[in-house]
Image (cartoon, rainbow, N blue to C red):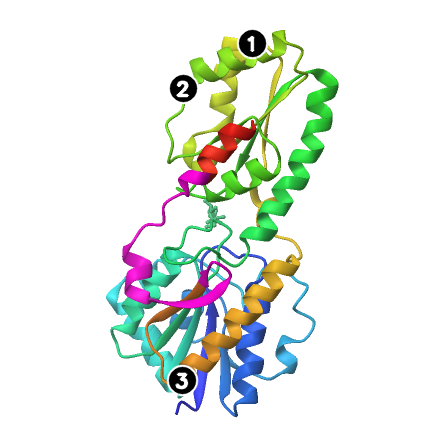
Amino acid sequence: MINSIAVVTSGGDSPGMNAAARAVVRTALGEGVRVFGIYGGYTGMCDDHIEELTSRSVSDLIQRGGTFLGTGRSTRFRTEEGRKLAYDNLKKHGIEGLVVIGGDGSLSGASLLSQYGMPIVGLPGTIDNDVWGTDYTIGCDTAANTILDAINKLRDTASAHRRIILIEVMGRKSGWLAMMSGIAGGAEYVLVPEVKFDLDVISEEIKESYSYGKRYSIIVVAEGAGSAVDIGKVIADKTEIDTRVSVLGYIQRGGSPTVEDRMKASLLGERAALALISGASNVVFGYDQGKVVSIKLKDAVTNTKTLDPELVRLSRVLA
Ligand code: F6P
């Protein structure tokens, strides 16, 4: 039985990371296990920014986006030397197991750290929904709802001026976030890196739809599919229709988590702590069709999650 664990958030912050960390802390304490917080992601691990947490340390957090532990993208941790230093710091505090909450880059870092013999349980924390082996990642639902709110507002202006409006959303190389928010927001087109698109065809279709009386068009562009500003220029030239672009940026990463993110992150946090305490190692907990499942850490970081072709099809049918 493990007596002492730590929790770290790493990579881009995502709404629900706090809920997950809170669940890890309170579950472990409930089992009589000490819990340490690592501040500032893997950088904090290298710098020994590690402090013991109590139940009160995670009060007043469930409603907050971001991460109270802080996060980062550490270049030092990418080196063997940095990881050894981080491992030594964990051992110095008597830490026997680690919960890592982050996206695929952070979980890849966790996998490398585990080679020193540190038991690790990962939780998928990213708005991108791009972690292999899980339908769900912590924060994606909140981000998709934030995008939806933006689309609803952009519709007003698009309709008033009969404009084409492109909205660029995050997701790194993945089109999941764009596809989810595009379908839910009723976008005419969702441009994602996984699917080729032809701006000549799109422009012709938009022109034709305007000639039948359509008032406006909304195009969601995943950042991985290209710059919405550049794509917007091409569409404006080809259609000669008034076109505007909105790059949503970091607004979509923050904010109070939705019910789904709070609930799912809390369940994952509890499962992670219980698994780690009872000896599990090198696994990631996620969801498969609504149920919590565990995936091997190695599989999660060596495979690439693909965009559901059913969603691609649906976005075309409904547009
Ligand atoms: O992984 C989350 C994410 O927000 C991506 O969607 C985006 O490409 C990236 O992080 C931005 O990273 P940074 O916060 O380092 O600018």
**Which stretch is magenta?**
287-310
Local secondary structure at mark 3? loop
8 lies above or below 131? below
**CA distance separating discs 3 and 2:** 53 Å
Q: Can the viewer see residue 65 in this picture?
A: no
Q: Residue at x 68, y 64 (%)?
A: 63
**Tag 1–tag 2 contact (CB < 8 Å):** no
Residues 36 and 158: in front is: 158
Residue at the spot of label 1: 208
Task: Pick the residue in front: 35 or 275.
Answer: 275
Q: What residue type is disc 2 on? A: Asp
- Secondary structure under tag 2 reads loop
According to the picture, the residue beneath numbered tag 3 turns out to be: 95
User: What's the mark number on residue 198?
Assistant: 2
Q: Is mark 1 within 8 Å of ligand 1?
A: no
Q: Earlier in the sequence, mark 3 or mark 2?
A: 3
Would residue 159 appear left or right of 220 to someone viewing this image?
right
Q: Secondary structure at mark 1?
A: helix
Q: Is residue 99 left or right of residue 32?
A: left
**Residue 153 lies in quadrant:** top right
| Magenta run includes residue 8 | no
Q: Is residue 304 left or right of residue 44?
A: left
Residue in the image at 39% along x and 73% along y: 121
Placement of 232 over or under 133, stated as above or below: above
Q: Residue at x 35, y 70 (%)?
A: 283
Q: CA distance from mark 1 to mark 2?
A: 16 Å
State whether label 2 is within 8 Å of ligand 1. no
